[in-house]
Amino acid sequence: MRAWVLLSAVLWYLAGVGWQRSSIITKEGFVYGKVGRPVKLYVELHHNSPVLLCTDFKRAQKETVDPTYLWIGPNEKPLTGTSRINITKTGKLLVKDFLEPLSGLYTCTLSYKTVKAETQEEKTVKQRYDFMLFAYREPDYAYQIAVRFTTKSCVGKYNDLLFKVLKKILNNLISDLSCHIIEPSYKCHFVKIPKHGLTHELFIAFQVNPFAPRWKGTCNESVDCEDTTNHNILQARDRIEEFFRRQAYIFKHDFKKTLPAMHFVDHSFHIMRMDSCRPGFGKNEGLHSNCASCCVVCSPGTFSPDVDVTCQTCVSTRIYGAKTCP
């Protein structure tokens, strides 16, 4: 166990991952600046940012004479207090209801004086602190599922009928969650099973998607709906998994002697989560290693027009969260 922990620590250091997205935030919700390097932060869309402090931890432990604070926003203009921007007299900055255009570089310059006790000589000192803020949102979940059913033959209408009935059953099972089955397909194969010879099996694949028609009605007029859709898709996943688990149980206990020609193949259930990002957002583990599982706002020079998981290059974009390439 110690060896595994040590290896993980070494790999973490070599990869230069640094702080996780929340570890630089104090218990009070404060983030200190760092001398000589920017602090990178990720703020969930429509949430408030942590409180940014125009000082570093070491400086904050000392007396500061006549401090003044100047905050510059991503538009390179001085920040003033608004309904969205809250700046205190002690240089604390809070950004409310964070949106894509609020992403970017926030710079604060702390000016203060040092006073020599013997001569009362004053000297003005300036220190700059940089914070890079990125809007992010949780990915939308979908699930790719594969199952297998035995069949009498690869030829005949019964295979199509089973496929259609199965789709209908599964859609009815999850329809109240505003989820549905998409991209269903099947192929019939010959399978050599040890000690049982050749059998015919249907290899069925489909995707469970949280965006059935009228899915927005489940959001209760909330601005951001990922929590609702992801909660629903997790329930849909569990229901479908339980359905096939029951199929295996029924065939194992209710058909002790003779199994029907077409039945679910036990242990053939396979599932994989598939993430997607909303337009204007994408994943980039290299650039955003501290938020690798997040859908982070596309930076200037990139865009994302659909529900892909990456931001594409577009040199003409100058904004955060671009959905088109002009």
Image (cartoon, rainbow, N blue to C red):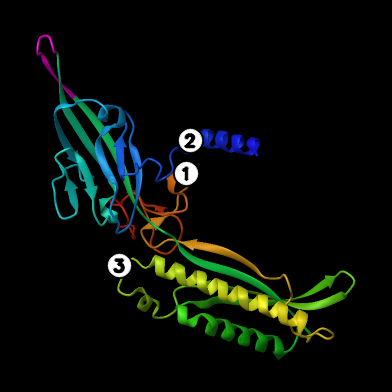
Q: Is residue 62 magenta?
A: no
Give the residues drawn in magenta, as a range.
Answer: 117-125
Q: CA distance from mark 3 to mark 2?
A: 35 Å
Q: Earlier in the sequence, mark 2 or mark 1?
A: 2
Q: Residue at x 80, y 72 (%)?
A: 191
Image-based side of 160 in relation to 179, left or right: right
* Quadrant showing the N terminus: top right
Q: Residue at x 53, y 37 (%)?
A: 12
Q: Earlier in the sequence, mark 1 or mark 3?
A: 3
Q: Return the x and y of residue 251 as percentages of the image width and height.
A: 75, 82
Q: Which residue is mark 2?
A: 16
Identify the disc placed on residue 223: 3
Q: Nearer the viewer, mark 2 or mark 1?
A: 2
Q: Residues within 10 Å of mark 1 (few under 14, many from 20)?
A: few
Say whether marks 1 and 3 touch (CB < 8 Å).
no
- Classify mark 3: helix, strand or loop: loop
Q: Which residue is mark 1?
A: 286
- Classify mark 2: helix, strand or loop: loop
Q: Residue at x 46, y 58 (%)?
A: 309
Q: Residues within 10 Å of mark 3 (few under 14, many from 20)?
A: few
Q: Return the x and y of residue 206 as percentages of the image width and height.
A: 59, 74
Q: Amino acid at mark 3?
A: Val
